Image (cartoon, rainbow, N blue to C red):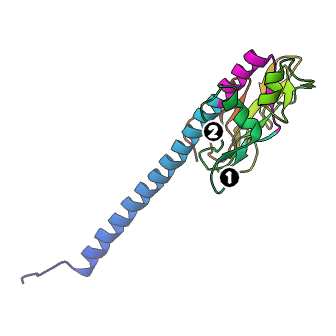
Amino acid sequence: MKRDGFSLLELLVVIAIIGVLASIVIANVANAIQRSRQKATMADLRTWATAEESAFHACGAYPVPYAEVGTCAPKPTPSAFSLGFVKARLLSTVPVCDGWHRPFVMGGAGAPPIPGPGDPDCTAYFPGASWTADAYTVYSRGSDGIPDCGPARYDPSTGVYSPNRPTCEGTPCGAFGSFRCDPTIGGGAFVARPKGFQK
């Protein structure tokens, strides 16, 4: 007997195989998108850390707003504080939003505030800023927008930074395993960072 086409069973098997392959590809693409957002966020956190360290060398203290560095909707808009880094020529552009389009948050990591630098240019560049002589932290709220590992805490007696909480999604904040956890910088180094495969 001569066959002119495929049987229904053969077509169903092919469709099932294509469905399995598509689900694998979609899962990998979604993971790659989250990873690229996380990498962009971490690069911007390094930029903020460099700007804070440069401000310390120029002014003798860290300027910190204890707030978000701007707004992200409808478009990224830096706060007056954040624009101070551009006016002081410490940044050419201000990274306001993380990879998930949420504003970065900056604070003093629990370090005691000081009256401010003696240089009037420094206070003019950073309106409304608090100043610390010891510490600062900058963090992203991760893919879920909820703070968990950040902000960093600073212990002045030891000079050590630590994450705000010890764990996130069942893994230590120091080396977390979820895109929902907060990448956090304190004092120029990552206090909470991703490690290994992310969920």
Q: Quadrant of the N terminus?
A: bottom left
Q: Residue at (72%, 25%) from the top-left corner?
A: 52
Q: Residue at (62%, 41%) from the top-left corner?
A: 177
Q: Which residue is mark 2?
A: 95
- Residue 77 at what x, y percent from top left? 67, 47
Foreground: 109 or 198? 109
Q: Above or below — where is 9 with respect to 56?
A: below
Q: Above or below — where is 153 with respect to 53?
A: below
* Three-letter code for the amino acid on which mark 1 is drawn: Asp
Q: Above or below — where is 160 with respect to 76?
A: above
* Three-letter code for the amino acid on which mark 2 is drawn: Pro
Task: Kindly state the secondary structure of the residue where label 2 is placed.
Answer: loop
Task: Kindly state the secondary structure of the residue where label 1 is placed.
Answer: loop
Whether residue 7 is in magenta: the answer is no
Q: Above or below — where is 196 with respect to 116?
A: below
Q: Residue at (61%, 49%) from the top-left corner?
A: 100
Camera sees residue 149: no
Camera sees residue 138: yes
- For the record, the magenta segment spans 48-66
Q: Which residue is mark 1?
A: 144
CA gap between label 2 and label 1 equals 19 Å
Q: Residue at (59%, 45%) from the top-left corner?
A: 99
- Residue 139 at what x, y percent from top left? 71, 37
Which image quadrant is residue 151 in?
A: top right
